[in-house]
Amino acid sequence: MQMQRGSDELLSSGIANGPLTMSHSTPATANGNDTKKFKGDRSPCSPSRVLHIRKIPNEVTESEVISLGLPFGKVTNLLMLKGKSQAFLEMASEEAAVTMVNYYTPLTPHLRSQPVYIQYSNHRELKTDNLPNQGRALAALQAVNTVQSGGLTLTGGSGIEGLTLSGQSPVLRIIVENLFYPVTLEVLYQIFSKFGTVLKIITFTKNNQFQALLQYADPMNAHHAKVALDGQNIYNACCTLRIESSKLTSLNVKYNNDKSRDFTRIDLPTGEGQPTLDATMATAFGAPGIISSPYAAAAGFAPAIGFPQAGLSMQGVPGGALGPLALTTSAITGRMVGITAMPGHSVLLVSNLNPDVILPHGLFILFGVYGDVHRVKILFNKKENALVQMADATQAQLAMSHLNGQRLHGRVLRITLSKHQAVQLPREGHEDQGLTKDYTNSPLHRFKKPGSKNFQNIFPPSATLHLSNIPPSVTDDDLKRLFASTGCSVKAFKFFQKDRKMALIQLGSVEEAILALIELHNHDLGENHHLRVSFSKSMI
């Protein structure tokens, strides 16, 4: 995807006020009155919380454009220029915009099956207060803000499509139509995990249709995924996703196998030949007692499937017509959605690290937010790079999707799957200056206990941190001073009203929060209490 600023970025609304004047000394704003192209007022590709979106199909609604930004944070403003097939989307923070651009750089998003192109805008904020025809955009934004602030009794009025929410369940019911190629549980996991933490998946066949129930940790994740993915194709012109909210609020998974999976319980048996759905859900969905093969509707297609880096490869397709499918991956797409992992690939390559300050322990703590880190190796001859081995491929995918594009020690992290199957420890007698560490048996692993609540509290990096295990004698001033001692600025702090062992602290930026988490997670607060730090979805 082209990410440099396009010279065609212009704002025009037919208002006679003339162009907005900009200079290097004042923040650039876009107010819809601009009739000239702006060049050179900011350096190319410098991040901005305002994003410029091009090649938007005419029939696309405001809510569809907003849905592009929702998985990455709060959307605060929108300016649609339908005559020019363009839009400007303002995120609440620059960090959210950076994460969004980094995500869509290799994965071109689609609206109404057409590719759209996203780049940083030359403008620092949108000023649309006095513009005509902003009613739909304002209504869509107000609806989204109502949902994000926790009001779950929303109905889509004012012609706003795709934003109906009433008592949203964290469980989605998914039907795959036109099933010409096999769709597996792993495929669904990697598609839907882009929108939040997936806890459980159950697949089954009903009325000769491949269906699934999928449970998120957060109902908002389910809403965002439904808005973004409903009606999209997994492969070109086939395997269409039909998504609706389920009446169920939780799934009961008995077995971990190719038809069902509880990602919070690695201790579950495989239960070969046993029913996947429990009796209650089987009755609710009319599913047979023994779940039939999800490939029943795709007669003649073998279920063997692999995920090489170059794209999707299927075996057993008649005539070998497809061979390896080199598919462009995409989050909201008419093509394969975000399939990058090979089963068993649990080693990540982390690049663009700051070689002067990076240590294995820092990577262990940071990546440990998203899974149990077994080994870390900073490369001896190229200390900007490191290998991080997670407990399994699911945790590796989770860490990569949340941390790729985040800033650490002034550098933007680049994370990909490594070709290595495991991180090798140095041979005995061959020291590597402490650049390789084995954390396999570390007591700091967050996810070693099956069914741990930590699985339900995995969130993207944010400026607000969740603190727990705080002893009674520690005050808010003590904690503020502790975090300030790491060099970060404390913007807000509050204890939980019902449980003073927990608190939220808001820092100056996401990067500050990442550094504070690395430095202060497991910090000894006295009284045999070690501080637990994680990213929060809440704001103070």
Image (cartoon, grey):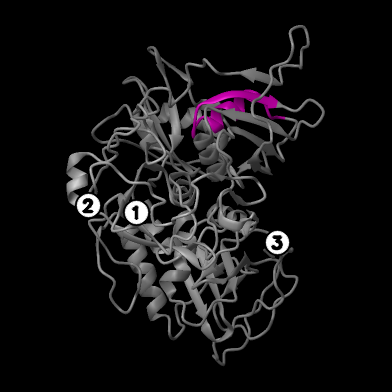
- Total marks in image: 3
Q: Quadrant of residue 413?
A: top right
Q: Residues within 10 Å of mark 3 (few under 14, many from 20)?
A: some
Query: Can residue 360 be found in the magenta stretch?
Result: yes
In this picture, is 526 found above or below 367?
above
- Distance, label 2 to label 1, CA atoms, is 10 Å
According to the picture, the residue beneath numbered tag 1 turns out to be 211
Alpha carbon distance from label 3 to label 2? 50 Å
Q: Residue at x 57, y 89 (%)?
A: 17
Residue 45 is labelled as 3
Residues at discs 2 and 1 in contact (Cβ within 8 Å): yes
Q: Nearer the viewer, residue 100 or 520?
A: 100
Which of pointers 2 and 1 lies earlier in the amino acid sequence? 1
Left or right of residue 264: residue 8: right
Residue depicted at 48% across the width and 29% down the height: 481
Check disc 3 and give the amino acid type.
Cys
Which contiguous range is marked in magenta? 357-377
Res. 357 in view: yes
* Mark 3: secondary structure: loop
Look at label 1 and name its amino acid.
Answer: Gln
Residue 62, image x and y in percent? Answer: 43, 74
Q: Residue at x 38, y 80 (%)?
A: 135
- Circle 2 residues within 10 Å: few <14, some 14–19, many ≥20: few
> Can residue 485 be seen here?
no
Specify the label residue 109 is tagged with: none
Q: Secondary structure at mark 2?
A: helix
Q: Which mark is residue 285?
A: 2
Residue 43: image location, x then y, percent: 74, 63
> 106 left or right of 520?
right
